[in-house]
Amino acid sequence: MPQEDEVVRRAPLFTALDDAAAVSLRASMDTVKIAKGSILFKEGDDGEHLYVIIEGKLKLGTSSGDGRENLLSILGPGEMFGELSLFDPGPRTSTATAVTDAKLLSLSHEKVIPWLKQNPEVSLQLLARLAQRLRRTNEAVGDLVFSDVPGRVAKALIDLGDRFGKTTAEGLLVNHDLTQEELAQLVGASRETVNKALADFAGRGWLKLDGRSVLITDVERLSKRSR
């Protein structure tokens, strides 16, 4: 199976399908390419499509009336977003922006509903995905109330490492492609406070910073700090 097909099959929309059904579903999807820094859709836009990422990374975020931004999540290959539009084709609840050049597959609401009727197991996968999303949202709210900034930074790095990290001889290399400001938005803190936490972790020998990536040299200690 080509690597691109393996990536697509990891998406919740495809995991419950056999190979023939997966090929048929993919054939009904449109390919979308988006350049780094470009906006795929904005908060408040009409939402009529879901997306599966094949290559690259996108970020989902919201903004307040005074211009402050909150980063909800970073998504990469094999991950799906915009699925709320399938069940409630209302305004988008976040803005999707390309963190890197990216390639996506899109599927419209009108095309996916027949699939859900013919393949009810897909509906179960999508419901599981929505439940997971709600659980993560609840955890994030709890973290903002009960966890300090260093703990939230550690948890974010461990999560990014689980999804984007590669094991090397020196440790877990995480190419997250985020600026310091974006990382601060992800944990709901100021850039200065997040930088202080990162410097402290580096001073303890738990990680090494390198631009938009981090080398986690002590996953165990960083994981403990995230709890």
Image (spheres, rainbow, N blue to C red):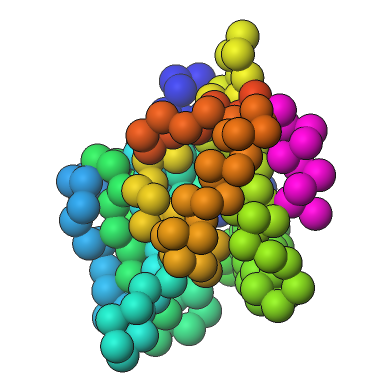
Tell me: 206 left or right of 195. Answer: right
| 32 up-or-down from 188: above or below | above
Tell me where residue 148 appears, x and y as whole percent.
69, 65
Front residue (pair 111, 138): 138
Can residue 59 be seen by looking at this rendering? no
Residue displayed at 29% across by 88% down: 66
Residue lying furthest top: 169
Tell me where residue 169 appears, x and y as whole percent.
61, 9
Q: Which residues are magenta?
A: 218-227
Q: Quadrant of the C terminus?
A: bottom right
| 5 up-or-down from 53: above or below | above
Tell me: 131 left or right of 167. Answer: right
Tell me: 169 left or right of 23. Answer: right
Front residue (pair 106, 65): 65
Residue displayed at 37% across by 57% down: 181
Can residue 201 be seen by looking at this rendering? yes
The image quarter containing residue 139 is bottom right
The image quarter containing residue 167 is top right
Figure disc tally: 0
Residue displayed at 24% across by 40% down: 101
Q: Main secondary structure of the magenta part?
A: helix
The image quarter containing residue 103 is top left
| 145 up-or-down from 221: above or below | below
Residue lying furthest bottom: 65
Q: Is residue 25 magenta?
A: no
Residue displayed at 50% across by 74% down: 84
Tell me where residue 52 appears, x and y as whole percent.
43, 50
